[in-house]
Image (tube, helix red, strand yellow):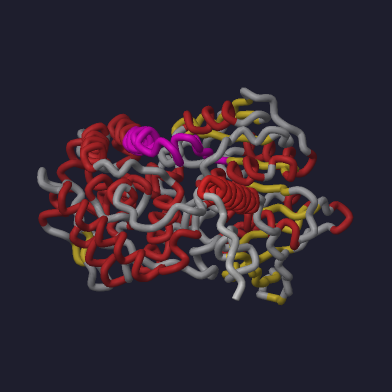
Amino acid sequence: MTTPHRIPRRLRRLTAAAAALTALAAAVTGTATQAAASSKPPAKPPVPSLVWTDCQGGFECANADVPLDYRDPHGRTITLAVIRKTAADPAKRKGTLFMQPGGPGNSGVDFVRNNHADLPAALRDSFDVFGYDVRGVGRSSPLTCFDDARYTRAVTEAKGVPGPDAYEPALRQAAEFDRACADNAGELLPHIGTAYVARDIDLLREALGEEQLTYYGRSFGSYIGTVYAALFPKRVRALALDGAYDPVHYADRPYAYDRPQYLALDGAMSRFLDWCAADQATCGFGDGDPRAAFEKLKADLDADPVPTANGGLANGYTLVYRLMFNINEGKVIWPSFGAALRKAQLRDNTSFLLRPPSPASFDFLGPNVAVECVDRDYPHDPRLLKRNVTANAKAAPLLGPAMAYGPPTYDHQHATACAQWPGGHVSRYDGSYRAKGSAPILVLGTTGDPDTPYQDAVALSRRLDNASLLTFEAEGHTAFGRSACATDAVVGYLVDLDVPASGTTCADETQPPSSTPRTAPPGTTLGELRNGVDERVERIGTVS
């Protein structure tokens, strides 16, 4: 048996110390290697393969598979529904025009199908017109929070004139909505934010064989375009952003975004009531005091709702909800508002202002809330939430209280849900919006816009490194299709890259007709004037 050599104690201590240092060095190296690996950009996801099939009316449809989570670009996928109509004049074709509607929650497939025929000929000749349903919307893995029955109960129980104790029930209902989102949307919920939507667009651009992106986005579509430019500035050919958002306020300072929206909506309603008072013969509502009549009408409908043709009930909240969306049409709809308000006074349920939100509306409203809750960084401070919600309701007394204390539906009703949001935010964009190195970007703002306040367009044009601002002096939401001046500017920019000088102003809004028209005035459709916007389907309109 061999006797082992005895190692001196001091040498053993030195050997142990050396081994510890070696192990520490290895651990540090391993950690550094892991950190370096984690800092590498993820592998490029595969480009979707688009197999086009006829889907009536000269349109082609396809499906595009994109990553559910761009942190795992070769992992699970979701399928996006896409549509296009090829350029009418192949000799003039310049590429593909992406068209993105507002929302969030509107279908890009329907937007292209419903509006293609009314686009200026120069756009239809020069481009394949392309649209798609963004993730979580329409035909692209649609997201559901409240089901139809629960949403119907929520909007039926809401009030046009909420009482003094309305805040706490609104908070509880918003928490219930959040839980329904988490239960029903599951794994999709954290992945519906706009950073991922913009990455989807870039994959679709590549799938279509386009070197750069040509894009028209209205309302929320303008924010999607803004994020795309921030992520891929060198891939921008032309971006027209109409009814633009201030992206910093929207995503990072949401209470600073919410207040101007309340004020813009109430301001538009106030200007309508002023016109109604000044032109009672055309308006036909209010008996000389339209403001007092409007306040009384909201309270009367709350106290005694009007039965609807389908067995539902229309109350003061119904009235406010319909006014909020339809006021986007601008001055051309004002006589129709007067007639519809007078019908509501008479408890005539054919008034389009007494049409409660339907399941078709809910398909829009659920994703509208959920996407914004993923995108926006609301502080989780209950005192700050209450202070802002109650202040907004007070600052906008015509429509604000119903919005502030109503169920989670449209923009003004998001704070109570988003401040309690249980889902993740991995797909929100939180970087700079400068889009340094991009081609010139056209931003459009409407001075009396009730939905995206004009100052947001001004702010975006200043935040972007290379932007030109076009101002439309008018009531209503967005400019393209409502103004010949603005429409011509957008067409020249998208087709020939002629950028309007920053500070260009258009002032050609169609004024209120003398009565509810029998034919649609420029910038709108007759169906919208007689019946209200058809469940939030977006139409651009035509200009003569």
Look at 45% across and 41% down and name the residue there.
251
Look at 74% across and 36% down and name the residue there.
439
Q: Nearer the viewer, residue 515 or 103?
A: 103
Whether residue 46 is in magenta: the answer is: no
Q: Dividing the picture into quarters, in which one does residue 354 lie? A: bottom left
Q: Dividing the picture into quarters, in which one does residue 533 lie? A: bottom left
On screen, residue 131 above or below 520 = below
Q: Which residues are magenta?
A: 242-268
Question: Looking at the rendering, in which quadrant would you find the C terminus?
Answer: top right
Whether residue 247 is in magenta: the answer is: yes
Question: Looking at the rendering, in which quadrant would you find the N terminus?
Answer: bottom right
On screen, residue 149 above or below 273 = below
Q: Position of residue 228 (x, y in %)?
A: 63, 46
Q: Outermost residue toward the right? A: 91
Q: How many marks?
A: 0
Horizontally, residue 412 falls left or right of residue 387, namely right
Q: Dividing the picture into quarters, in which one does residue 131 lie? A: bottom right
Horizontally, residue 468 falls left or right of residue 336, namely right
Q: Position of residue 314 (x, y in %)?
A: 23, 60
Q: Position of residue 78 (x, y in %)?
A: 57, 69
Answer yes or no: is residue 100 visible. no
On screen, residue 425 above or below 268 = below
Q: Position of residue 22 (x, y in %)?
A: 61, 50
Look at 31% across and 45% down and name the residue there.
338
Look at 36% across and 51% down and name the residue there.
410
Answer yes or no: is residue 193 visible. yes
Q: Main secondary structure of the magenta part?
A: helix
